[in-house]
Amino acid sequence: MKVGHAVRITNLSYFNDPNAKKRNKSLVGKEGKIVSITLGIFKVQFDNGEVDFFDGRELEFAEKLEPRNIDLVFVSWQKDGKSVYDTEEGDKLFIGDFHHGTVFKGTLELDEEEASRVKQAWKMGIHPVFDIRIRDDEDKRKNRRDEKPQTE
């Protein structure tokens, strides 16, 4: 969530500043717009002009996101920020679908402001880069087995 987004108040359980006024339970369920964020505290303004402060865990996103069709273009296999093309460990990776220029179709849910920002960046020659990581349950179990017990 960022400044300008519409949010809905879900609870009043987290923001417990002793100097803050007691918040009315009628705020739960109300929608407002984020006007600023400072150190994880969201300043929210409601339609009647009232302003209050909330912990991010007390809010839910209330904007409408629209699916945007995208192309993910594969650039390279990299290790430590450098391509592994034409290396022993990289040779077996570049023979499949993941080679330079391969296009994968996908969908992202973005609001109009974010979609406009990405389009403008492309016009200026600035391109976002994506990483793909697939983790399954077997990986999680393996990581637990590899952990060593702590000793004092």
Image (cartoon, rainbow, N blue to C red):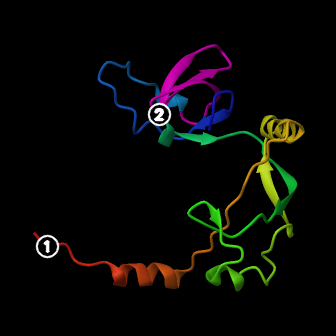
Residue 32 as seen in the image, left or right of residue 138: right
Residue 139 as seen in the image, left or right of residue 96: left
Q: Residue at x 86, y 42 (%)?
A: 122
Image coordinates for residue 37, horizontal then vertical, percent: 53, 27
User: Which quadrant holds the N terminus?
Assistant: top right
Mark 2 lies on a secondary structure that is: loop
Image coordinates for residue 117, horizontal then vertical, percent: 80, 36
Residue 35 as seen in the image, left or right of residue 152: right
State the residue in front, 51 or 5: 5
Instruction: Give the residue pinned by disc 1.
Output: 151
State the residue in front, 65 or 50: 65
| Pointer 2 or 1: first along the chain | 2
In this picture, which residue range is highlighted in magenta?
A: 28-54
- Position above or below: 60 against 135: above
Q: Residue at x 43, y 25 (%)?
A: 23
- Position above or below: 145 against 14: below
Instruction: Specify the amino acid type for callout 2.
Output: Gly
Image coordinates for residue 45, horizontal then vertical, percent: 61, 20
Instruction: Specify the amino acid type for callout 1.
Output: Thr
User: Which quadrant holds the C terminus?
Assistant: bottom left
State the residue in front, 151 or 43: 151
Classify mark 2: residues with Cα within 10 Å, few (<14), some (14-19) or many (20+): few
Q: Is residue 49 magenta?
A: yes
Q: Residue at x 63, y 21 (%)?
A: 46
Identify the disc placed on residue 98.
none
Instruction: Give the residue pinned by disc 2.
Output: 40
**Mark 2 vs mark 1, CA separation in Å:** 36 Å
Classify mark 1: residues with Cα within 10 Å, few (<14), some (14-19) or many (20+): few
